[in-house]
Each structure stands twice: as structure tokens, then as C-alpha cells.
Image (cartoon, rainbow, N blue to C red):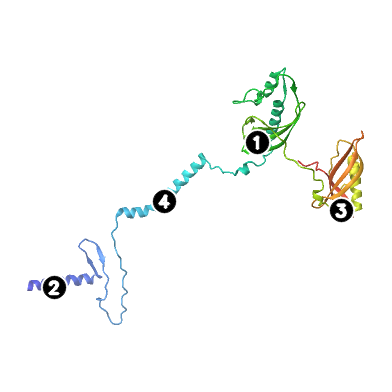
């Protein structure tokens, strides 16, 4: 019993020393652990109670999960950068091409003087032949021919006779595909008369002109009867002063008299006189043009040989300081 009592006394002394050492005790693993005094801590009168300490919870987690959680944002950033690089490479190697509607692709083509001239030159060579010299036609067509087309462009002229082209003119054009234009060429021949021929020309950026196939005979563009009065919607000019100015200006304009014409022109107005001198016979009608500031004059004139012409002119007019002046006649000589 005494031995047991001594053990308890030694244990109690050791416990008291531990508590007296700031409430710390050494664990068996060699780690200092601070313990918080709770409800069993003694209270002394007149002293404030010590606030409770925070409680720390230690949980075990696998090391790979901790490493993954720390490295995940970096891996996501790498993935996004790689996806962006692949997308840029894809658009560089194979850029997307917009699918345009067929109606837009068949819109009127932009003016291409080189391709237009190419089409008219081919039409002239195609429609010209001479039975006694067939090699002349093949020589004229040689610059236009290519693989898949015969030397005569599919034409076998008759055994006798000849045909000449007097003039050619492009009257219509359309663009079925990017870089391709189909021209309708009007050609006046001395044997067959007026013909209309479609010629398809390829002219892509950075490439030479080339035929896209054989030509075709077609009809003329659609046309209808003349509409000289827009259905009777134009108003007659009822101002005698304006009528007098317009008639005098047109008389001097047709006669090629710039000094007399200048008296009726507005400051800064520019006109280009016609190359044929005409004598004004009469002003048949004068109407206001649609909109404002212009009139339409219908006149009859005669040249020096006695030929008479009925002509229509549009004149821009303005009223300045109580009198009418002409600022333009039918055209702008400075326009492109």
C-alpha cells in the first residue's frame, strides 16, 4: 500500500508540475500539444475568465489529392492554351469560307475592262471567217484556245463565202461564280446581221484571262416600249421667265456658242458642248424633273445638211437674286 501511495504521490507531483508549466504536457510522440482549460479550470474572485481557445481539427488526406488540388488551375490553363494554339493552326491551314447564297453569287459583276475586252475580241474572231483562207480564222482564235477545245472553237464555216464583223458591244454581264463573268456581246455582221453571243471569261486575282468554255448564241436583253413621261406624272413648267432662260441656253448650247451660253450659266457651272452644230427649231415641251431643281426639255433641232432631230435634255436650274440660271446641261463633264 505504501508503494502504491508513493506511486500516486509521484504521479500527482508530476501532474502538478505539468500544470504549473503553463498547462503544457509532453506527449509520447515528442510533439508539444497545448491544451485548453475548460470548465474544470479554477476560478478566482475578481479575475475575468480566460476566453476559450479555438479548436483545430486535423484530418488526413492522401498526398496525391493535395498535389492535384494545387496543380489543377495550372493544368486547366495549359489545356486552354493548347486548344487556342490548335484552333489558330486550323484556321491558318484551312480558313473558313462563307457560304454565300446563290442569289448573291449571281449578282451583276464588277466592271472588269480587261475581261470585257477579251470577250469582245473573241466574239469578233469567232464570227469572222473566209472560206478561201480558213487558216486565218484559226490563227485569230489561237490565243483563246486551250485543252478541251478544238482549234476552230467548235465552228465549221461553210465551203464558200465569208463573213465580217462590223462592230461589237458588251450589253450585259453576270457573275455565276467568283472569278467568272459571262458577257453578252452584241455583234453586227455583214451577212447574218445583229447577233448576240455569250462568252464566259475566267479572271481570278493574280491569274491570266481565259475562256471558261464554248460560247452560246442568245437573244437580246429584254426591252419594252419607251416611257417618255413616266406615266403622265411630270408637271409642266408654268414660269415664263424659266422657259425663256432654258430655251435661250439650249439654243446657244446646240449652236456651240460658249460666250453667249455663259450669260445664262450659274457661277462655277461647267458644260461640254456637242461636237455637231445644230439650230434649235422649237421647244416642244418643258416639264419639272422628278425631285427638285431640274427640268426636262424636249426640243427639235436641225443640222447644216437639213436633217432634223428630236432631242431631250435635262437641265439643272436655280433661282439666284430673282433670276433663273442653268448649272448643268444633261451631263457632268468632270464625272468619272
Q: Marks 2 and 3, Cα distance to the nearest angstrom?
A: 130 Å
Mark 4 or mark 1, earlier in chain: 4
**Which mark is on residue 43?**
none
Q: Earlier in the sequence, mark 2 or mark 3?
A: 2
- Report the number of discs: 4
Image coordinates of residue 275 in percent, x first then y, are 86, 36
Q: Position of residue 172 (x, y in %)?
A: 71, 37
Residue 76 tag number: 4
| Res 67 visible | yes
- Screen quadrant of the C terminus: top right
Q: Which mark is residue 319?
A: 3
Secondary structure beneath disc 3?
strand
Q: Could you tell which of marks 3 and 1 lies nearer the N-terminus?
A: 1
Tell whether label 2 touches label 1 (CB within 8 Å).
no
Residue under numbered circle 1: 181
Q: Between marks 2 and 4, how big is the CA–CA gap?
A: 64 Å
Q: First in sequence: mark 2 or mark 4?
A: 2
Task: Find numbered disc 2 in the image and state the secondary structure of the residue it sits on.
Answer: helix
85 sits to left or right of 330: left
Q: Position of residue 36 (x, y in %)?
A: 27, 71
Mark closest to the chain's N terminus, 1 or 2: 2
Work out which quarter of the rendered image holds the N terminus and state it. Answer: bottom left
Q: Nearer the viewer, mark 2 or mark 3?
A: 3
Q: Residue at x 37, y 52 (%)?
A: 71
Amino acid at each position: 500500500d505504501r508503494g502504491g501511495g508513493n506511486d500516486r504521490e509521484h504521479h500527482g507531483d508530476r501532474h502538478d508540475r505539468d500544470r504549473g508549466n503553463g498547462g503544457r504536457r509532453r506527449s509520447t510522440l515528442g510533439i508539444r500539444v497545448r491544451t485548453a482549460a475548460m470548465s474544470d479550470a479554477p476560478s478566482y474572485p475578481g479575475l475575468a475568465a480566460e476566453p476559450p481557445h479555438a479548436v483545430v481539427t486535423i484530418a488526413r488526406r492522401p498526398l496525391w489529392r493535395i498535389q492535384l488540388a494545387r496543380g489543377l488551375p495550372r493544368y486547366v490553363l495549359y489545356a486552354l492554351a493548347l486548344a487556342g494554339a490548335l484552333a489558330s493552326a486550323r484556321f491558318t491551314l484551312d480558313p473558313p469560307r462563307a457560304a454565300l447564297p446563290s442569289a448573291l453569287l449571281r449578282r451583276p459583276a464588277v466592271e472588269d475592262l480587261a475581261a470585257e475586252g477579251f470577250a469582245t475580241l473573241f466574239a469578233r474572231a469567232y464570227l469572222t471567217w473566209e472560206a478561201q483562207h480558213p487558216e486565218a480564222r484559226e490563227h485569230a482564235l489561237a490565243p483563246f484556245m486551250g485543252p478541251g477545245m478544238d482549234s476552230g472553237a467548235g465552228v465549221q464555216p461553210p465551203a464558200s463565202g465569208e463573213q465580217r464583223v462590223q462592230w461589237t458591244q458588251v450589253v450585259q454581264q453576270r457573275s455565276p461564280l467568283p472569278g467568272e463573268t459571262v458577257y453578252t456581246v452584241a455583234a453586227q455582221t455583214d451577212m447574218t446581221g445583229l447577233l448576240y453571243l455569250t462568252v464566259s471569261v475566267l479572271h481570278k486575282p493574280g491569274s491570266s484571262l481565259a475562256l471558261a468554255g464554248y460560247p452560246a448564241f442568245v437573244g437580246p436583253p429584254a426591252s419594252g416600249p419607251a416611257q417618255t413621261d413616266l406615266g403622265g406624272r411630270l408637271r409642266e413648267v408654268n414660269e415664263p421667265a424659266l422657259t425663256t432662260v432654258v430655251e435661250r441656253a439650249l439654243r446657244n448650247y446646240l449652236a456651240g456658242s460658249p460666250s453667249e451660253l455663259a450669260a445664262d450659266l450659274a457661277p462655277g457651272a461647267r458644260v461640254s458642248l456637242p461636237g455637231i452644230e445644230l439650230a434649235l427649231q422649237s421647244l416642244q415641251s418643258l416639264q419639272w424633273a422628278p425631285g427638285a431643281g431640274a427640268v426636262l426639255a424636249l426640243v427639235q433641232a436641225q443640222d447644216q445638211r437639213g436633217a432634223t432631230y428630236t432631242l431631250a435634255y435635262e437641265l439643272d436650274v436655280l433661282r439666284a437674286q430673282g433670276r433663273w440660271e442653268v448649272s448643268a446641261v444633261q451631263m457632268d463633264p468632270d464625272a468619272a
